[in-house]
């Protein structure tokens, strides 16, 4: 290794980064852009921005000047515009300097909000599909400007030369790509046309396409003197059109949403935020979606498709709609495939959320049939909104469906027959008590689902005559009738053996009568009580150690589970009459196992073992008796 001459290269001398273009293109393809197909979006974007700049330069220019022409015949892809064009100095400054954007020029920078792109790396995306980029441009800033040709290659080299004005009679720019053999997937004529429609269907400038067969006309040569081609964006956005009636407008927007998303919307909500130049629609999904799944939304910026998966445009609770919007003032990220999270986006998200709330309010006030269909499909989304939105809570809580001891019904219907509403803290608790509570005339709501318990507790804010309380095991057992004294005395020996058999589960045993008579036993036990008993057991096992002291300090008097036997059930009446100690013990274990299964909570290993053992013991007893 030869060290550089210190005198020739001072330690504090400025140096220039050396850029490996192939490495940079690889970085773009794997980490910035989601797919090579974005090359066409970048070319369209550059053309649109060039036309925007020329409009600013020549506001009185005829409208037919501001068009974009695409050509793809399988051997080349060409994008041509009549925009502001480039001078030779611009070419050296912008095309040959990675990261610099022509949209930062002095007079254009002031109009930056009018442009789609904000980064000067878009042209590099063309190297994802081609090894050479050819640019022919003529500036509109100088009437007698010469044409400039730039050729950039994938190895990082480029050439620039000036040509006579006749090489391009009109101002503007033509970009021509010679695709690599391995990129035919993205550069075939049909694919180029499809990509142009995908990215540019809402562009405000006319875009035409020619596949070289002569059927659609074409842009001709580099000078751009050919006739019109097949239109890529023949109509403006559906919300920008005029319709004879409001009904016709509504049907047209719904048809557009169905065409974009592939489902018939339950309803279509028109979106309009003039402050940021946003227009579009939100399509209400006709079916429920899993909680928390956020659909992507189609976001266009100044007509150019930015993303099909923009989740950040709406709040998390709005997973019942899919949106397609076009905005003027939203800021794209460097890849132009997502939105930059800033104050503007936050304000837009809040404003769109307000539009969705207003739609729900209108449906509640004027279209009960639509509201019913909406709530049937999307009650979970509305519940999540109602938790944090008092207006929606007051408006819709009585209409939201809940699982109750009267079946699936609304709180409005439930409150008409139950002035005292009890709510469980878990699904398993509701499953344990539902049948018995219903037979006892208690009104219980399953509060184990997301948001439900919190919402039910807010019911008195809307119906002051209703009281809501958490279901306490004592409340339920208080509604179970005691057996007569003679029956209880006769069952004393059996109950003692049952308590001894179930002591390992910290379970007490009692005898009551309750409906339905088909239920032999009720296991009253809460998740919190089980956790407390587990913690107490750990404390006993760790007694004397550090963890034992810590758990002991946390230990409370652990509430015991209760196995309540139903005297009205024939199986229980037969069990309490058993005199044989071992059989009595086995029958008590079997009744506990059955009650645990009916509670639908996860079984502990010891409980699973008990169920198997009690079944085998009962089977063995029956076989001995038969023999």
Image (cartoon, rainbow, N blue to C red):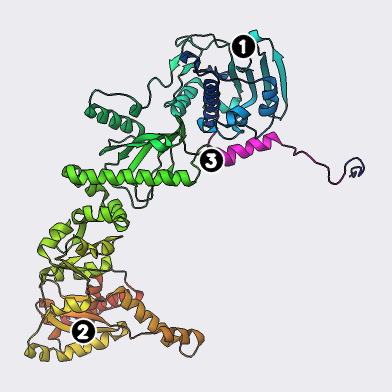
Q: Residue at x 22, y 43 (%)?
A: 362
Q: Up-down: is 569 above or below 296?
A: below
Question: Looking at the image, do the residues carrying marks 1 and 2 touch, with CB atoms under 8 Å apart?
Answer: no
- Would you name the residue on which mark 2 appears? 509
- Would you name the residue on which mark 1 appears? 168
Q: Disc 3 on helix, strand or loop?
A: loop
Q: N-terminal of the two: label 3 or label 1?
A: 1
The reply to whether residue 465 is in sight is: yes
Question: Looking at the image, do the residues carrying marks 2 and 3 touch, with CB atoms under 8 Å apart?
Answer: no
Q: Residue at x 28, y 56 (%)?
A: 390
Q: N-terminal of the two: label 1 or label 2?
A: 1
**Magenta region includes residue 454:** no
Whole-percent x and y of residue 105?
63, 29
Q: N-terminal of the two: label 2 or label 3?
A: 3
Q: Up-down: is 380 above or below 531?
A: above
Residue 561 falls in image quadrant: bottom left
Whole-percent x and y of residue 421?
17, 67
Give 202 or 407, whichever is nearer the viewer: 202
Give 427 or 170, whichever is nearer the viewer: 170
- Would you name the residue on which mark 3 appears? 333
Give 185 or 332, whichever is nearer the viewer: 332
Q: Disc 2 on helix, strand or loop?
A: strand
Mark 2: few, some, or many residues within 10 Å (few <14, many ≥20)? many
All told, the count of numbered labels is 3
**Magenta region includes residue 27:** yes
Residue 296 falls in image quadrant: top left
The reply to whether residue 623 is in sight is: no
The magenta region covers: 10-35
Q: CA distance from mark 3 to mark 1?
A: 34 Å
Q: Which mark is residue 501?
A: none
């Amino acid at each position: 290794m030869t060290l550089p001459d210190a005198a020739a290269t001072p330690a504090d001398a400025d140096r220039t980064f050396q850029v490996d273009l192939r490495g940079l293109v690889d970085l773009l393809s794997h980490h910035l852009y989601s797919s090579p197909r974005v090359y066409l979006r970048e070319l369209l974007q550059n053309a649109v921005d060039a036309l925007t700049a020329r409009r600013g330069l020549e506001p009185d220019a005829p409208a037919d000047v501001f068009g974009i022409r695409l050509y793809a015949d399988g051997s080349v892809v060409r994008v041509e515009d009549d925009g502001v064009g480039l001078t030779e100095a611009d070419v050296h400054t912008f095309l040959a300097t990675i990261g610099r954007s022509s949209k930062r020029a002095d007079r254009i920078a002031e109009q930056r909000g009018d442009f789609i792109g904000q980064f000067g790396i878009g042209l590099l995306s063309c190297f994802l599909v081609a090894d050479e980029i050819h640019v022919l441009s003529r500036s509109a800033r100088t009437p007698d400007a010469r044409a400039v040709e730039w050729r950039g290659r994938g190895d990082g080299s480029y050439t620039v030369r000036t040509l006579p004005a006749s090489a391009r009679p009109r101002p503007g720019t033509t970009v021509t790509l010679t695709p690599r053999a391995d990129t035919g997937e993205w550069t075939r004529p049909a694919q180029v046309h499809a990509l142009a429609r995908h990215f540019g269907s809402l562009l405000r400038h006319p875009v035409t396409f020619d596949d070289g067969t002569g059927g659609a006309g074409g842009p001709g040569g580099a000078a751009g003197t050919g006739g019109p081609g097949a239109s890529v964006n023949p109509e403006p956005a559906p919300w920008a059109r005029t319709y004879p009636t409001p009904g016709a407008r509504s049907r047209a927007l719904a048809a557009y949403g169905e065409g974009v998303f592939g489902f018939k919307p339950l309803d279509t909500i028109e979106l309009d935020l003039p402050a940021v130049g946003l227009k579009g629609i939100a399509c209400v999904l006709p079916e429920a979606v899993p909680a928390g799944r956020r659909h992507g939304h189609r976001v266009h910026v100044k007509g150019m498709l930015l993303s099909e998966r923009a989740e950040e445009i709406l709040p998390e609770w709005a997973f019942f709609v899919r949106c397609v919007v076009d905005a003027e003032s939203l800021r794209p990220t460097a890849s132009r495939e997502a939105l930059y999270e800033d104050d503007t986006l936050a304000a837009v998200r809040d404003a769109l959320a307000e539009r969705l709330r207003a739609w729900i309010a209108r449906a509640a006030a004027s279209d009960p049939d639509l509201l019913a269909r909406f709530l049937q499909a999307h009650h979970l989304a509305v519940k999540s909104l109602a938790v944090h939105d008092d207006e929606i809570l007051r408006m819709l809580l009585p209409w939201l469906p809940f699982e109750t001891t009267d079946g699936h019904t609304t709180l409005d219907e439930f409150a008409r027959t139950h002035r005292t509403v009890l709510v469980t803290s878990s699904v398993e608790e509701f499953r344990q008590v539902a049948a018995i509570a219903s037979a006892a005339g208690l009104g219980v709501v399953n509060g184990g689902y997301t948001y439900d318990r919190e919402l039910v507790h807010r019911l008195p804010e809307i119906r002051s005559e209703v009281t809501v309380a958490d279901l306490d095991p004592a409340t339920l057992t208080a509604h179970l009738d005691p057996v007569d004294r003679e029956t209880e005395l006769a069952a004393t020996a059996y109950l003692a053996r049952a308590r001894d058999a179930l002591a390992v589960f910290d379970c007490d045993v009692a005898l009551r009568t309750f409906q339905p008579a088909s239920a032999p036993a009720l296991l009253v036990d809460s998740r919190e009580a089980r956790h407390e008993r587990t913690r107490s057991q750990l404390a006993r096992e760790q007694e004397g150690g550090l963890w034992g002291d810590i758990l002991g300090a946390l230990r409370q008097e652990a509430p015991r589970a209760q196995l309540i036997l139903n005297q009205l059930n024939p199986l229980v009446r037969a069990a309490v009459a058993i005199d044989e100690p071992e059989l009595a013990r086995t029958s008590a274990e079997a009744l506990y196992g059955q009650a645990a299964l009916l509670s639908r909570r996860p079984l502990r290993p010891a409980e699973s073992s008990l169920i198997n053992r009690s079944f085998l013991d009962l089977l063995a007893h029956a076989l001995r008796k038969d023999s």
